[in-house]
Amino acid sequence: MKAMAASSRPVQISHGTCFFPFSRQINTFCRPRRRLCYTNSKGLKWFGYGVCVSPPSFEVAAVAGGRERAQVSAAWDEGPYELLPNGKIQYLDEQDVVTFLDPPKELIPLDPTTYNPAAYLWKKIEVIPEERRHNLLHLLSPRCISRAWGIAGTRYDDPKLVKKMASSLLQNKDGSTLEYYNCIKSGGQIPIAWINHFKKALFSCKDGKTYGRFIGMGLAGFANSFNPLYFEVKQLKEVMSTEHPCDLAYEFGDGLFDFHEYPEGFPASVKHRYPFNDQLVVYVRFVGPGVLVGQAWQEGKSLEQVPRKLCSEILMIKDYSPRPLPEKQ
């Protein structure tokens, strides 16, 4: 499998050339060409203004970069990426997710009956290295996050996919007892509208239950006035207000949980302030490994109160850094 190019004539591609999957073609052929960079197993980099990628065991050539064809004998050390005009790197794996959630208008969508959108999205997130998944926090728009919630709803149509879990702590896969997530939301009622970026912690206790807390970020003084915002994690199959499927529910209650032990540096539980004390529940769907999306509903203590969404969808991505937060939180 070879791709040949010469600066003096149009690019010619031989039969059998392998291009990126559907969403990657969007980024390379429907937009102005950008400088691309690839790194092979020997640390050598070559550049071009088009894309032709084949498995590592085949010969690969830069499509318009003027370099000689190179034999790649092992997997690339890092995935393909674009060099933006400002010099920043933009990885194509992350762009695949963005494009799938918000495709260009000129493209005709695939028939959803021919494939499972949630399974496709899960696989796209799975190929992004753990240490790079946080890039989705600034790449995904509020529109994309809302669509992620909707697409994750098709996951329940796949018996195999529905058994997968986005958190190793929840399935006790690696023996972890504490996980941190970076979260982002947009919109919402005051005072929630003032808090867009925050962290989430999940931890398991010896009583077999799983708890968590939201940790305010950004407007520290204001956000911290709601701390420590503890909640209990429960397995739940349905959003009460809409009867739509979900995986988990974060139930805040009154905040006075009887913990026998706390993770290091965590404060004691205190009674929640409004609106977190008004039967607040965050319903969660798994999107991919380490990636979740949620909806916050204020269901109210009064039986006559009509449940309402407290904010728009919340994107939550696991923090894989060794020490995500300082001890005092």
Image (cartoon, rainbow, N blue to C red):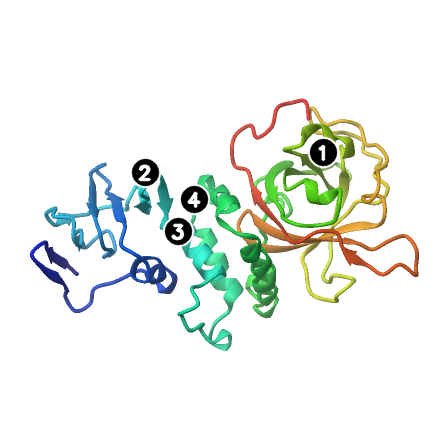
The residue that disc 2 covers is: 87
Which quadrant of the figure has residue 241?
Answer: bottom right
- Taking 225 as reference, is 187 above or below it? below
The image shows a total of numbered marks equal to 4
Q: Is residue 126 above or below residue 271?
A: below
C-alpha distance separating marks 1 and 3: 34 Å
Which mark is nearer the camera, 4 or 2?
A: 2
Distance CA(mark 3)–CA(mark 4)? 9 Å
Label 1: which residue? 223
* Amino acid type indicated by mark 3: Asp
Q: Is residue 103 left or right of residue 315?
A: left
Percent x, y of residue 314: 63, 50
Assign a secondary structure to mark 2: loop
What residue is shown at x 75% (from left), y 67% (from top)? 243
Closer to the camera in the image, 116 or 88: 88
Task: Kindly identify which numbered label has been placed on residue 93.
Answer: 3
- Whole-angstrom CA distance, mark 4 to mark 2, is 22 Å
Foreground pick, 206 / 220: 220
Residue 280 falls left or right of residue 109? right
Specify which label sits upstream in the sequence, 3 or 4: 3
Quadrant where the image shows the C terminus: top right
Q: CA distance from mark 1 to mark 4?
A: 31 Å
Give residue 221's position: percent from left, percent from top: 72, 28
| Residue depicted at x 52% and y 29% | 322
The amino acid type of the residue labelled 2 equals Gly
Q: In the displayed structure, would residue 24 be above or below residue 270? A: below
| Residue found 49% across the figure and 60% down from its top | 101
Read off the residue under disc 4: 129
Of the image marks 1 and 3, the number of the one nearer the N terminus: 3
Q: CA distance from mark 1 to mark 2?
A: 35 Å
Lower sequence index among marks 4 and 2: 2
